[in-house]
Amino acid sequence: MSQSVSPSSVSASERSTLNEISRPGQIRRLGRNLNGYFGETIDLPSILADCVAAARAHGWTVTEIPVTETLTLSALTRPGALVTKDKEATENRSPRVYISTGIHGDEPAGPLAVRQLLQENQWPAGFGLWLCPCLNPMAFRLNRRENAQGVDLNRQYLHPAAAETSAHIGWLERQAAFDLCLCLHEDWEAHGFYVYELNPDNRASFAPDMVSQVAGVCPIDTSEVIEGRPAKHGIIRPAADPRERPQWPESFYLVTHKTRLSYTLEAPSDFPLASRVAALVVGVNTTLTSLERQWKSLPRSSFDGPSGG
Ligand SMILES: [Zn+2]
């Protein structure tokens, strides 16, 4: 039932879907993803090779974070990202943004979205960018949510037992603090795109703009309860203190140790793949544009949080 997506092109059905994206109201649930994801799979090594090639072509630095003797995680950083921890408070610095995806192997739209973003190379000028295009490569090989040992890596960030998570956290600890973190996911139960916001200082929210722009390419899940949490217009603002949760997703680690503003974007995986990829690409681009605008208009002190590092 799985249909492989050619690494550097889209299928005919996707192309027809791309035409439909200009009319998101006509995009319907496929109805085939019940009790799990049964949609398209991707050739992850090809996608990652494309990401690395695009990053190198545009002057990024490529790091392979060692996990085991046979497994590494790619980390792509752009100049502007190359600040050391003691220099991170300088007055004239640029915004620093972290983007990750591919922590669940049954969510192909994330790696495809970051490949598109890297190839398009339309990032705001001067931004420092850190990008992890796939945090769980083994899960993609197995076409399932968990890694080879059956661990959901997105529950590992308080007490990491998985080698992938330990390696990822070790790398994150060596990076500067981020002004914004974006984690790209998919949800096969969703009726449309939605986003989790972690914003403990109640800063100006980027979520409404993100959702309204994504609505141009993908339906929005307007349910009042999503994943058991109250939602409004596709936005979930979890009230729980991370310290009260025993199993941390990556975003809890980020908002506790690396940032004061984190968004987890969820594309609806029972919808056409092209629409989901477009949703994540538009979600990222809209939010970076919002940050760029805000950065020019607000004093730096409004970004440097109390517990950045
Ligand atoms: Zn996920």
Image (cartoon, helix red, strand yellow):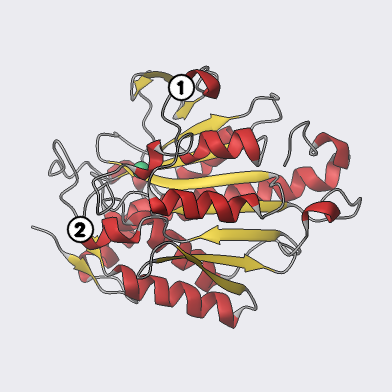
Q: CA distance from mark 2 to mark 1?
A: 28 Å
| Quarter of the image that includes the C terminus | top right
**Residue in the picture at 54% in, 21% down:** 243
**Residue in the picture at 68% in, 47% down:** 178
Q: Residue furthest right?
A: 91
Q: Is residue 9 above or below residue 294?
A: below
Indicate the secondary structure of the residue bearing disc 2.
helix
Q: Which mark is residue 245?
A: 1
Check disc 1: other Cα within 10 Å, few if <14, some if 14-19, many if 20+.
Answer: few
**Circle 2 is placed at which residue position?**
142
> Please, what is the three-letter code of the amino acid marked with disc 2?
Leu
Q: Is residue 1 above or below residue 46?
A: above
**Residue in the picture at 35% in, 51% down:** 276
Indicate the secondary structure of the residue bearing disc 1.
loop
- Is residue 206 among what the camera can see? no
Seen from the viewer's position, the closer of residues 83 and 238 is 83
Q: Residue furthest left?
A: 1
Task: Where is residue 84? Give x, y as percent.
Answer: 78, 59
Number of numbered callouts drawn: 2
Is 103 on the left-hand or right-hand side of 206? left
Task: Where is residue 300? Give x, y as percent.
Answer: 86, 42
Task: Where is residue 135? Give x, y as percent.
Answer: 42, 55
Q: Quadrant of residue 33?
A: top left
Task: Where is residue 44? Give x, y as percent.
Answer: 31, 68
**Residue in the picture at 41% in, 54% down:** 164
- Is residue 248 among what the camera can see? yes
Q: Are marks 2 and 1 in contact (CB under 8 Å)?
A: no
Ranked by sequence position, the earlier of labels 2 and 1 is 2
Q: Which mark is residue 27?
A: none
Is 200 on the left-hand or right-hand side of 54? right
